[in-house]
Image (cartoon, helix red, strand yellow):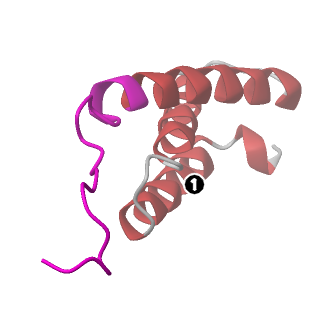
Amino acid sequence: MELWEIWWVWIAGALVLAILELILPGFIFVGFAFGAAVVGVLLALGLSLTLPWLLVIFAVVSAIAWAVARQIVGERKGQRKTFDRDINEDP
């Protein structure tokens, strides 16, 4: 059995990516963490695929999860800060 066929390796990778997301916020690793978790669950349920197919599932699920996360909690309209005067202008 190869390393990528072990379900808990994918779950451990998902946890590492989720921890990285907590340390470096910005919704960079959240999609990858979700994709790894989905692949880990599929392997735990008994799905047996080759590495290329596992990577395709990981990539597709990660991209979808990232896009959904950006839509749900991404930048909202009106959140940009605008400045009406220069800091060097006299009050």
Residue in view at x 36 percent, y 63 percent: 22
Residue at 54 percent across and 48 percent down: it is: 8
Q: Is residue 82 magenta?
A: yes
Residue topped by disc 1: 13
Does 29 sit left or right of 70 as displayed?
Answer: right
In which quadrant is the C terminus drawn? bottom left
Q: Residue at x 40, y 70 (%)?
A: 23
Would residue 26 appear left or right of 48 to someone viewing this image? Answer: left
Where residue 79 sits, quadrant-wise, is top left
**Residue pictured at 48% horizontal, 64% vertical:** 20
* Residue 59: image location, x then y, percent: 69, 28
Instruction: Please tell me whether residue 38 is drawn above or below residue 53 in the rendered image.
Output: below
Vertical relation: 56 (above or below) 83: above
Residue 80 among those drawn in magenta: yes
Q: Label 1 is placed on what type of residue?
A: Gly
Viewer-proximal residue, 63 or 61?
Answer: 63
Quick one: SS at disc 1? helix
Over which residues does the magenta segment extend?
70-91
Q: Quadrant of the N terminus?
A: top right
Asked if residue 65 lies left or right of residue 71, the reply is: right
Nearer to us in this view, 31 or 82: 82
Residue 33 percent across, percent down from the top left: 50, 44
Q: Main secondary structure of the magenta part?
A: loop
Find residue 26 and report its horizontal and vertical position in percent.
Answer: 43, 53
- Please rate how many residues cluster around mark 1, counting C-alpha atoms within 10 Å: few if below 14, some from 14 to 19, many from 20: some
Looking at this rendering, what residue extends furthest in the front direction? 90
Residue 37 screen position, x and y as percent: 49, 37
Image height of 90 relative to 7, above or below: below
Comparing 5 with 63, the one in front is: 63
The picture quadrant where one finds residue 50 is top right
